[in-house]
Image (cartoon, helix red, strand yellow):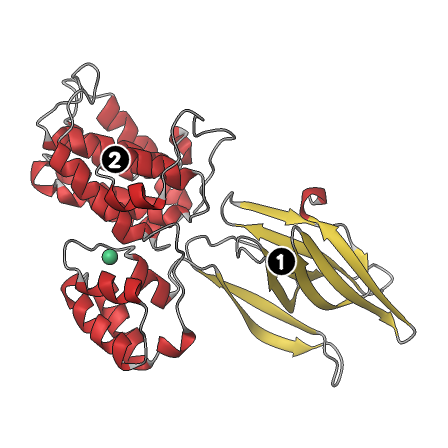
Amino acid sequence: MTLILPEGFVPEEIPRLTEATWLECGDPFPMLHHLARTTWSGRKFRLFAVACCRRIWHLIDADYAREAVDFAERLADGEASEEEAHARCQAMFARVYGAEPKSSNAVCACCDASATAVEGRNEWDAAFFAGKAACAAAAGNYSDSIPRWNESDLDEARNQSDLLRCIFGNPFRPAVINPQWSTSTVLNLATAIYEERAFDRLPILGDALEDVGCADAHVLLHCRQGGEHVKGCWVVDSLLGNDEMNVRFVDCQEIGMGSPFRTCKIRFKGAWIPFLQENWQDRMAQSQDRRYTALVAWAISRQNNPGFRVFVLDPKEGRILRSKRIKGCCESLTWDGDCIVYRAFRDPARQDEGRIGLATLG
Ligand SMILES: [Zn+2]
């Protein structure tokens, strides 16, 4: 799952929001433009698109369109393959946008919500187009109106703004979750709320959080404020780590008796699951802003000399970057700003430290 925004996508004339305008804004589209300037996973935008479609569920006049929304939600949760998504997207676009008479805006919203890169869309586009079409659908507007979204339901726009605040929280105050709150009671509650869409239980989650010492006014207020909450709700997501790319090392094996160097396999969980077959070492480091994850793969030479490469995963752009081969065994890996700093062990007399600039990776 990737989020790729072309350079300069947000026109400069679109004003940046302040915290006060974000909290009061009743128009989702400047809010989406604001979010496009910051770093979020594609998953959150997709879930917003899905939530917009669910709000106009009663206006959707085709079963295949509702199925597309269900599919988009599974895609957001990493439960559907990109290949299947691309194939469905192409078929859906041909069916919806090639139709005569024109498909209703409600159906277009569903099509937009499930759109993928094959139609030149990304998750942000899915959110933007699905939101626009849903507002037009709520206003009783059909897609062959010119311009297509010439009327927009203002109540629907306000509801969508609330959805954005539910999903993205307050981007001016990133969520801080104290690991001590993550007791089994809290995590079980949060998991059930997410999986069963039982957002009416959020006040119970608020009480459970308070019981384990949470005094964060933003977290508690969001749990207790009522209103509509949807999959992607920032409190539930933050507790469950739903948006983090999670790397787990499995099948670790020592290279030599007692050596600190191990080969392993890697399992990914999260919004973006890259496919990588390498001979991994159990070393990992995440950049300070948590956007990039650096991993180490063994690169033994033909003469059997140890060496490694550093891989950098960039879920935001769906990129995987790779360093040149470095001699030795990687002892440690850390980030310093835009650089990865490694220590390599070559022999007892020689330890190297090196820096790899992100911009130098290919
Ligand atoms: Zn919420």
Number of residues whose C-alpha sits closer than 10 Å to that of mark 1, classed few (under 14), some (14–19) or many (20 or more): many
Which residue is label 2 attached to? 130
Q: Tell me whether circle 1 and circle 2 mark residues in contact (CB < 8 Å).
A: no
Tell me residue 128's x, y (percent): 30, 34
Q: Could you tell which of marks 1 and 2 lies nearer the N-terminus?
A: 2
Dot 1: what SS?
A: strand
For residue 264, which numbered disc appears in the image? none
Looking at the image, residue 234 sits to the left or right of residue 8; the answer is: left
Q: Is residue 136 left or right of residue 17?
A: left
Identify the amino acid type marked 1: Ala
Give the left or right position of residue 137, taking residue 360 as reference.
left
- Crowd tier of the residue under label 2, counting other residues whose Cα lies within 10 Å: few below 14, some 14–19, many 20 or above: many
Q: Is residue 69 visible?
A: no
Give the position of the C terminus as an image quadrant: top right
- Classify residue 51 as left or right of residue 302: left
Q: Which mark is residue 294?
A: 1
In this view, which residue lies farthest toward the top? 146
Query: Is 174 or 314 nearer to us in this picture?
Result: 174
Give the CA separation, mark 1 to mark 2: 34 Å
- Residue at image position (24%, 35%) is 27
* Secondary structure found at label 2: helix
Query: Could you tell me which residue is drawn at 41 percent across and 45 percent down?
Result: 82
Q: Which quarter of the figure has residue 22?
A: top left
Q: Residue at the far bottom: name it.
A: 258
Q: Please, what is the three-letter code of the amino acid marked with disc 2?
A: Ala
Residue lying at 7% horizontally and 41% vertically, measured from the top left = 58
